[in-house]
């Protein structure tokens, strides 16, 4: 639901203004269904149509645990925030999404930082790989991935500038990120 106005005066780049909203929906990730609470793309700018995203999806993973995934920011560099009720750290939330239980109770889990990074990378890559084909038509990027570096989870964005030149940007999302 919504409207986006596109205008292009002769000799100028196109400009975009408007909001699109999904009022009811779900998202399935790794066989787990999330209900969309909010899904908004806001367009304002000139040149490439890069909307600002505000997407919130919720999953009741157990009787006691509810998880919220919030994707926001420009579509070519979104951020992913995971929260839960009751509050837990990110690795614990991802363990509940994937395994339906605490990472301490998950198969082969020791609850260490390596597992946290691996779970975050797996979850983020799944989210962005599932979103990328739908957004490819609108975004000037070729690849978005959530990885893990020495500071924890990181997001990488890559685009092809010429047939022989690629640009890759990486931003740490860990506690040391600035």
Image (spheres, rainbow, N blue to C red):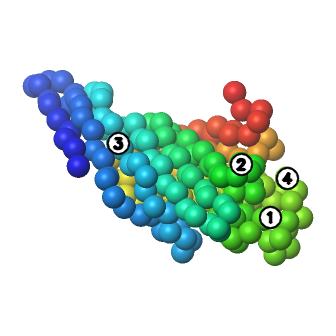
Q: Does the CB distance between marks 2 and 4 fall below 8 Å?
A: no
Q: Secondary structure at mark 2?
A: loop
| Residue mark closest to the camera, 2 vs 1 | 2
Vertical comparison of 170 with 10: above or below: below
Vertical comparison of 166 with 43: above or below: below
Residue at the spot of label 2: 87
Which dot marks residue 103?
Answer: 1
Identity of the residue drawn at 28% across and 44% down: 20
Instruction: Mark 1 or mark 4: name the one nearer the start of the chain.
Output: 1
Identity of the residue drawn at 65% across and 52% down: 84
The residue carrying pointer 3 sits among few (fewer than 14), some (14 to 19) or many (20 or more) residues within 10 Å by Cα, namely many
Residue at the spot of label 3: 41
Lateral position of residue 141 relative to residue 70, left or right:
left
Lateral position of residue 152 relative to residue 137, left or right:
right
Instruction: Mark 2 or mark 4: name the one nearer the start of the chain.
Output: 2
Vertical comparison of 102 with 107: above or below: above
The residue carrying pointer 2 sits among few (fewer than 14), some (14 to 19) or many (20 or more) residues within 10 Å by Cα, namely few
């Amino acid at each position: 639901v919504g409207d986006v106005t596109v205008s292009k005066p002769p000799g100028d780049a196109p400009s975009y203004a408007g909001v699109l909203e999904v009022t009811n929906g779900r998202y399935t990730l790794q066989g787990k269904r999330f209900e969309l609470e909010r899904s908004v793309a806001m367009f304002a700018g000139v040149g490439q149509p890069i909307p600002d995203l505000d997407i919130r999806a919720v999953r009741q993973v157990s009787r006691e645990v509810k998880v919220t995934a919030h994707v926001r920011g420009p579509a070519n560099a979104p951020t992913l925030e995971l929260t839960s009720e009751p509050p837990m750290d990110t690795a614990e939330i991802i363990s509940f999404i994937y395994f339906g239980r605490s990472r301490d109770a998950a198969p082969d889990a020791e609850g260490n930082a390596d597992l946290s990074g691996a779970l975050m990378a797996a979850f983020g890559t799944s989210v962005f790989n599932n979103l990328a084909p739908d957004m490819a038509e609108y975004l000037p990027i070729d690849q978005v991935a959530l990885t893990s570096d020495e500071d924890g989870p990181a997001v990488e964005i890559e685009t092809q500038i010429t047939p022989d030149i690629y640009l890759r940007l990486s931003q740490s999302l860990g506690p040391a990120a600035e």
